[in-house]
Amino acid sequence: MAGSGVFEEIFDGEVFKYYVDGEWRKSSSGKSVAIVNPTTRKTQYRVQACTQEEVNKAIDLAKVAQKSWARTPLWKRAELLHRAAAILKEHKAPIAECLVKEIAKPAKDAVTEVVRSGDLVSYTAEEGVRILGEGKFLVSDSFPGNERSKYCLTSKIPLGVILAIPPFNYPVNLAVSKIGPALIAGNALVLKPPTQGAVAALHMVHCFHLAGFPKGLISCITGKGSEIGDFLTMHPGINCISFTGGDTGVAISKKAGMVPLQMELGGKDACIVLEDADLDLVASNIVKGGFSYSGQRCTAVKVVLVMESVADALVEKVNAKVAKLSVGAPEEDSDITPVVSESSANFIEGLVVDAKEKGATFCQEYKREGNLIWPLLLDNVRPDMRIAWEEPFGPVLPVIRISSVDEGIHHCNASNFGLQGCVFTKDINKAMMISDAMETGTVQINSAPARGPDHFPFQGIKDSGIGSQGITNSINMMTKIKSTVINLPSPTYTMG
Ligand code: G3H
């Protein structure tokens, strides 16, 4: 049960505490924020509604703790991360239970998220030891007009205090993908978890606490975005923001000021299907890519662009697979579970209604009970329909029939997003040329879009984000280069 066993100290019996200065505390606000279970639509948990003063305190403590953490040997930082990873994996069951209750993640996927997170933290520790243990050595006479009289030594140093804001759909995994790189690089970390997913995140933070990280180095602040959101993101004590989520990221980017940003803000990931594609492979990938976690992944297949000549055959195969998806509660490990909130379900329904009014073909009957929406494939979608461009973040997938590959590429590139895309063909030359033409951070050939494995670079262009993630890139992003130049007293020494 959430908040029991080793997690007892994070819960006061009614409200989950927040984490600061190496302790679990109640907010002085005396207020809490409710977390509604998407399945039952009743309050499942409560977390502290922290105040701005508590944010100030966490950042002040982080500043102090970071100074000595930066001087802690790299191997010791790695050792603590490995310990946290092991504790996280050991306690995967209670953390996964929170994911099931807070964000309706299917039971097996919830466990997978926690295990994947432990693996990510371990890999980060190892990668950090390797890449942060290296620097550069340059000599001046490579540049015209210079003698061999200056030696430049560069190394990577931490940025200071990193603010990590993960999204509801991976509140553990996309938190540790920020926490791990921040810590190994010698930074302190302030985590602001999403409201849905906050309790899973608090459990995860407790695993770092149990691992024995220094007091003040990590804090986890819960509360209302309206109260502490802007305050945190515009705080002068924050030296870098790593955010994953939706439109809020655009607003944060505009307000943040002169700090490095790592932003991942969603996508409209296109799946281009050529005439020679293996349609069984395509259908499996569309169903897995489009409907896993009910389409609530930034990397979900969000529009199928299929050549007209194979469209009927593909739609038939996809429909056969959609018919086999189980729909129901996350506890039963159903394939399709309720979407995260009522407002999200209403938004998805708005896209469906628009598509209906404009003449899309419904391959299944539209069905909704509360936040639960049955999987729906919409065929013959045209560019004048909202679903052709907008991200439903739900189990509704549009199919646009195309008469040329160029038409597919044009649709993909006309999107404001540019996260990932995929192309299915047996012709590798064509696949490479299409990949080159698609304006997205990643193109998958013959597979659905996906972020992992987690050491791969992961980036979006246009409204899909700023910077590149993936373990190595995140470590590099959370450091800056420091040079020390040794100036020799006289021109080059000559023998004899
Ligand atoms: O929702 C955004 C995530 O970065 C997607 O990750 O491809 O592992 O599901 P995933």
Image: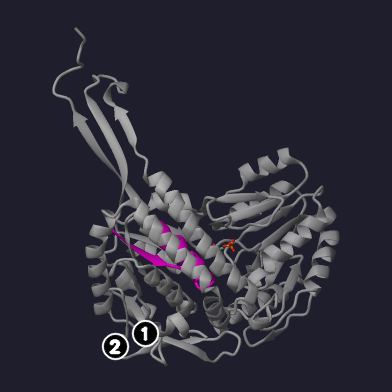
Q: Residues within 10 Å of mark 2 (few under 14, many from 20)?
A: few
Q: Disc 1 or 2, which lies upstream in sequence?
A: 2
Image disc number at residue 48: 1
Residue pictured at 26% horizontal, 53% vertical: 71
Image disc number at residue 261: none
Magenta residues (range) = 160-182
Residue under numbered circle 2: 29
Q: Nearer the viewer, residue 114 or 296?
A: 114
Where 426 falls versus 205 (above or below)? above
Q: Is residue 473 visible?
A: no
Q: Quadrant of residue 110?
A: bottom right
Residue 168 on the magenta segment: yes
Residue furthest to the top in view is: 496
Residue 127 on the magenta segment: no
Q: Amino acid at mark 2?
A: Ser
Q: Nearer the viewer, residue 392 or 142?
A: 142
Q: Residues within 10 Å of mark 1 (few under 14, many from 20)?
A: many
